[in-house]
Image: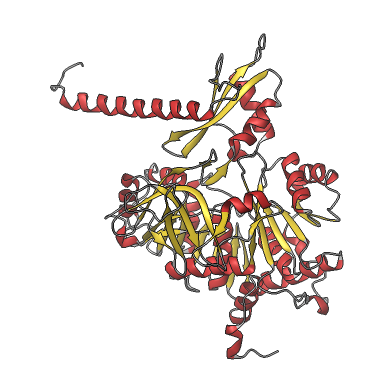
């Protein structure tokens, strides 16, 4: 059917990003994965074929399709294929263990599970405990996406009758109870978030985005969605493990956009061969998760003088909340800015009133990008989504403490719950503690966050061994690596004789956390004092 100008007025479903870019620029490179390059026509055709395959296997509108995949063309095609089939995709971290994968499959009652064959041992173990999964597709590689290439009926996407108010995806995020919560995002939610972000980033079809972030993490996922929406090119890598190779790829592909987390920035700044002007095509860098130290901001500005640096804050429940215009970075480097375009953000105090400048309170977000709630979890949904300024709406209470300056710029203060944020992702201490208690010889355990110059916040496990146990710190670490996702494995393990408790016997995790933060602050002051004394000492003294 020919397009008309009125098509732009129609509500948008996320799969239309790929379809429209394939219509406008079919031969343009949409995705680079390793040495392989895929045009928009390639991606769209593969997604159409897989969508038909899913429908043929019984996947219906509204069914959930779990994608247990590494960063790959299969993952990108898989998410668009699920949407083209009218289904809801759920991207799962490829380091997830079988018990947690089974929990996710059962919780959302997934109809289909798509994975890589090298992950099939975990996938099949989880599938055996997930009766809802009727469709199982293990993929060896991109070649498995090219089935029935000459079938005329698979050239166009299947009809599904969906609208923009349908769910597009469920993203599982850590919960304070130790069980992940499924964040429900409609096509309208995703489109609102993607449109707002691409507006302030001034995204264009000329953009080439380097994405080393896992697309099971929404920061990484949206790089793909926004790149395809803008009609640009996404260079998809599995990780930042080999930064030299990533930087070489950035030069080869003339990358214009590079999303970072503080960990990556710290690694970049430790590389001795980087020189200002090495990346003349780089137009912008973005940072989220934790605020970059002012010294890192200054150094990044020196290394990438022509690139704008966007400091941002967000959470899975609405994707992005705030951004700091790059021209404000030197004026207020500790701020995460103001509300993103087309949204509102404010702070409420303990009385539920709008906070005054300088007053600490909870950040509240209003906008079309706010989630519909947690999948089949009314209690948690009602805790987060509460009545807004107008009778017809609910707004998102983030659970994060902020303050605002006189000019309305926002500053992150801390979290209201026990959830930790490490490497840019939320981590539940309870989930790690549950895994620790499954290790024979563990009597008690408390998991906390400690300041870390690279990770921002590192995970520390404090364990009390059972009487007579020969448990070692190495035993704990080996157990965690075998039973937890990579991002949940503690960086530090400490064995103690006891942990502080309440009168009812509950471990005072907050007290343990406060002690760790106090020790970190004292250590920092000690190092600063030593440096100061060294500077004051006469030349030759103490040598």
Above or below, 532 against 262 in this view is above
In the foreground, 87 or 23: 87
443 horizontally vs 278: left or right: right
- Residue 183 occupies which quadrant of the picture? bottom right
Residue 182 placement, left or right of 262: right
Residue 528 image position (x, y, % from top left):
28, 29
Q: Is residue 437 above or below residue 52?
A: above
Taking the spot 79% from the left edge, 42% from the top edge, the residue there is 121
Q: Quadrant of residue 336?
A: bottom left
Q: Would residue 93 be visible to someone looking at this image?
A: no
Q: Where residue 474 sits: x, y (%)?
A: 61, 21
Q: Position of residue 160 (x, y in %)?
A: 77, 74
Pick the residue in front: 44 or 462: 462
Look at the image and tell me whether residue 476 can be seen.
yes
Colouring:
secondary structure
Task: Looking at this view, name the residue that lies furthest to the left.
Answer: 538
- Please name the residue shown 20% across and 24% down the image: 533
Residue at 40 percent of width and 65 percent of height: 281
**In terms of depth relative to the viewer, which is nearer, 380 or 518?**
380
Q: Residue at x 42, y 58 (%)?
A: 346
Tag count: 0
In the rendered image, the residue lying farthest to the top is 468
- Estimate the x, y position of residue 114 in percent, counting from the top left: 76, 55
What quarter of the picture does the N terminus occupy? bottom right
**Left or right: residue 22 compared with residue 231:** right
Quarter that holds the C terminus:
top left
């Amino acid at each position: 059917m020919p397009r008309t100008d009125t098509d732009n007025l129609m509500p948008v479903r996320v799969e239309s990003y790929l379809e429209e870019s394939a219509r406008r620029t079919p031969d343009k490179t949409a995705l680079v994965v390793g040495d392989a390059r895929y045009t928009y026509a390639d991606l769209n055709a593969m997604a159409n074929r897989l969508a038909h395959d899913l429908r043929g296997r019984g996947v219906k509108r509204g069914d959930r399709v779990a994608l247990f995949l590494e960063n790959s063309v299969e993952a990108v095609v898989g998410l668009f294929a699920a949407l083209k089939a009218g289904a809801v995709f759920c991207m799962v971290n490829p380091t997830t263990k079988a018990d947690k994968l089974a929990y996710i499959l059962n919780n959302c009652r997934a109809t289909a599970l798509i994975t890589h064959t090298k992950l099939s041992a975990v996938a099949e173990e989880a599938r055996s405990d997930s009766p809802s999964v009727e469709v199982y597709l293990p993929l060896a590689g991109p070649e498995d996406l090219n089935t029935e290439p000459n079938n005329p009926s698979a050239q166009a996407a299947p009809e599904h009758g969906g609208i923009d108010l349908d769910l597009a995806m469920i993203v599982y995020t850590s919960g304070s109870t130790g069980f992940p919560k499924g964040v429900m995002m409609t096509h309208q939610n995703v489109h609102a978030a993607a449109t707002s972000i691409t507006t302030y980033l001034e995204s264009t079809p000329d953009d080439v985005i380097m994405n080393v972030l896992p697309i099971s993490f929404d920061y990484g996922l949206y790089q793909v969605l926004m790149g395809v929406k803008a009609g640009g090119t996404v260079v998809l890598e599995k990780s930042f493990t080999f930064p030299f190779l990533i930087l070489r790829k950035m030069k080869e592909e003339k990358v214009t956009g590079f999303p970072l987390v503080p960990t990556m920035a710290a690694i970049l700044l430790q590389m001795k061969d980087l020189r200002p002007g090495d990346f003349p095509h780089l137009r912008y860098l973005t940072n989220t998760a934790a605020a970059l130290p002012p010294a890192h901001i200054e150094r990044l500005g020196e290394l990438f003088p022509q690139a704008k640096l966007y400091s941002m804050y967000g959470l899975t429940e609405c994707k992005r909340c705030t951004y700091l215009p790059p021209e404000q970075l030197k004026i207020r480097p500790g701020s995460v800015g103001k509300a993103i375009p087309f949204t509102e953000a404010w702070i409420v105090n303990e009385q539920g009133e709008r906070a005054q400048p300088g007053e600490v309170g909870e950040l509240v977000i209003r906008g079309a990008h706010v989630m519909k709630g947690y999948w089949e979890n009314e209690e948690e949904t009602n805790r987060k989504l509460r009545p807004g300024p107008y009778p017809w709406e609910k707004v998102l209470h983030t659970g994060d403490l902020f303050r605002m300056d006189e000019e309305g710029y926002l500053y992150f203060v801390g979290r209201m719950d026990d959830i930790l944020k490490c490497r840019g992702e939320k981590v539940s201490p309870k989930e790690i503690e549950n895994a620790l208690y499954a290790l024979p010889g563990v009597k008690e355990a408390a998991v906390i966050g400690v300041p870390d110059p690279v990770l921002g916040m590192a995970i520390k496990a404090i364990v009390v061994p059972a009487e007579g146990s020969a448990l070692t710190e190495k035993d704990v670490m080996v157990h965690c690596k075998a039973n937890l996702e990579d991002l949940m494995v503690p960086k530090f393990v400490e064995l103690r004789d006891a942990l502080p408790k309440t009168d009812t016997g509950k471990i005072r995790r907050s007290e343990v956390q406060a002690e760790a933060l106090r020790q970190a602050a004292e250590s920092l002051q000690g190092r600063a004092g030593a440096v100061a004394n060294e500077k004051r000492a006469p030349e030759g003294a103490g040598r």
